[in-house]
Image (cartoon, rainbow, N blue to C red):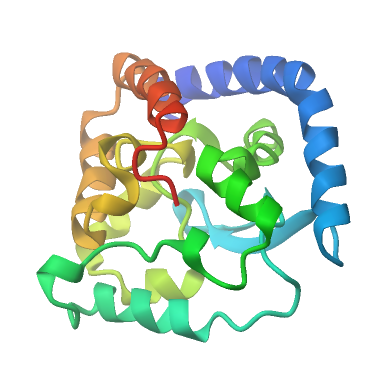
Amino acid sequence: MSAILKQYRILDVLLSSIMLVLLSPLMLLIALAVRLSSPGPALFRQMRVGFQGRPFELLKFRTMKENNDDSVHRLYVTNLLMGLEPEGNNRIYKLERDPRVTSVGRILRRLSLDELPQLINVLCADMSLVGPRPALSWEVELFDPIYAARFLVRPGMTGLWQVSGRNRVSVTRGLDLDLEFVRRQSLRLYLKILLKTIPTIVMGNGAR
């Protein structure tokens, strides 16, 4: 492991441990709200592609009704990745407008609170606090080979893509930002992205 990745890991363990302790009461309340808002578990589990292409189980608070059909969203993202959408419409689908999303889920998505369980992923070394967006396996199959370098680091809860506009940024631009993070990776950039994430969430800039 490179020196910079070791530095990331030390900060990941330290900060995620502190955040899990401080945020545990809030996370328990959210879990209760999710369970009461619709039938199903509090946590949503989904396989993603992680560091060096290894699969891992990503955790989130469930924001959608159970047993929903993701075919429309999947087709939309597939078209974007294949360049079949006009550039002006090349934006990530806004899931908070999706009828599959619960009332509690809309609030969680707007404030990015649905992603808090990923602190466990960070502590378990599946993810980092900062890194490329964790991708689905079917998305990776559609990526241009030049984006393989994004898997040289752990996927992040936040990243250069997220603090640069999130869903207002085109898919290809977002992937380019992931590569830029890998090329420029440094402790300074890691901390800068973490600090920029707070106002991005508070102001709801491009929230999914």
Residue at position x 29%, y 45% from top? 178
- Quadrant in which residue 100 is drawn: bottom right
Identity of the residue drawn at 67% across and 65% down: 64
When the figure is inspected, residue 18 is found, relative to residue 101, above or below; the finding is: above
Along the line of sight, the residue nearer the viewer: 53 or 66: 66
Q: Is residue 189 left or right of residue 120?
A: left
Apparent side of residue 23 relative to residue 72 in the rendered image (left or right): right
Taking 143 as reference, is 78 above or below it?
Answer: below
Quadrant of residue 121 within the rendered picture:
top right
Q: In x, y percent, where is residue 180?
A: 20, 40
Residue at image point 45% right, 76% down: 73
Q: Residue furthest front?
A: 103
User: Which residue is at the front of the view, 158 or 95?
Assistant: 95
Relative vertical location of residue 190 with respect to residue 128 in this rendering, above or below = above
Q: Position of residue 144 (x, y in %)?
A: 23, 69
Image coords of residue 151 (percent x, y): 39, 51
Report x, y in % for residue 172: 20, 60
Asked if residue 58 shows in the view, the reply is: no
